[in-house]
Amino acid sequence: MPASRSRAGARATQALGERIAGRATRLVGVSSLRKVDRTVPDDCTGVVRIAYESAGIELMTGIGRAGDNGVTHIYQRARSLGAVHQGRPQRGDLVFFRETYDRDRDGRRDDGLTHVGVVERVEANGAVTFVHRGSKGVARGKMDLRQPRVHRAQGSKAVVNDYLRRASRGSRAYLTGELFAGFASPGPLARAGTVAPPR
């Protein structure tokens, strides 16, 4: 591929990510997605769907596997398109987490993928800020995969990794870095050609 086409593709992907991240940012502080869009669930999948639909990408397409939740459906589709990665994320990437709650209420950590957000910012040191639907509405979360089990920086109040799974009887709380499952880039999802309805 000629260098000029490669650079143009990289710029287009960056612009796509900026648009997605910008839409996610504007959702921060919203207590219920019902105030924004009644066609998506008022949960973590609703946030990422609104953000991606602003760039013309529909995340919930096709028929998922029986028993899969929305997060797993989005992850499986992203993986089938080659979008899932473990490398340094970019603005607008999806970020997936596993075992963030006891989905089947059996007391075990066996629930697979349960949470998703949109990468809003990546610091020079690799620390990630993402936007997601938390228990109190749409908020920012922090994650640093270099220090997955550290909540606050030593001698500081700065959050390194936010808590994402609450402590429960017989189980401690877990941090974002501990529950991280992968990233997914928007480029392959956009190239798949599944266009979201205008919002």
Image (cartoon, helix red, strand yellow):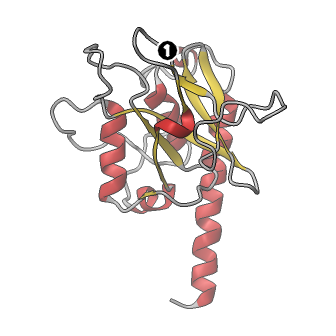
Residue displayed at 54% across by 14% down:
135
User: Circle 1 is placed at which residue position?
Assistant: 167
Kindly indicate the quadrant of the structure image that contains residue 134. Answer: top right
- Residue 199 seen in this snapshot: no
Name above or below for residue 188 compared with residue 70: below
Badge 1: residue crowd in 10 Å (few <14, some 14–19, many ≥20): few
Q: Which quarter of the figure has residue 70?
A: top left
Q: Amino acid at mark 1?
A: Ala
Q: Position of residue 156 (x, y in %)?
A: 84, 31
Residue lying at the far bottom of the rendered structure? 2
Instruction: Tell me: 51 left or right of 106.
Output: right
Residue that appears at 60% across and 13% down: 136
The answer to which of 136 and 126 lies nearer the viewer is: 126
Q: Residue at x 55, y 34 (%)?
A: 176
Q: Residue at x 68, y 42 (%)?
A: 22
Give the percent coordinates (x, y) of residue 99. Answer: 39, 29
Let me know if residue 35 appears in the view.
yes
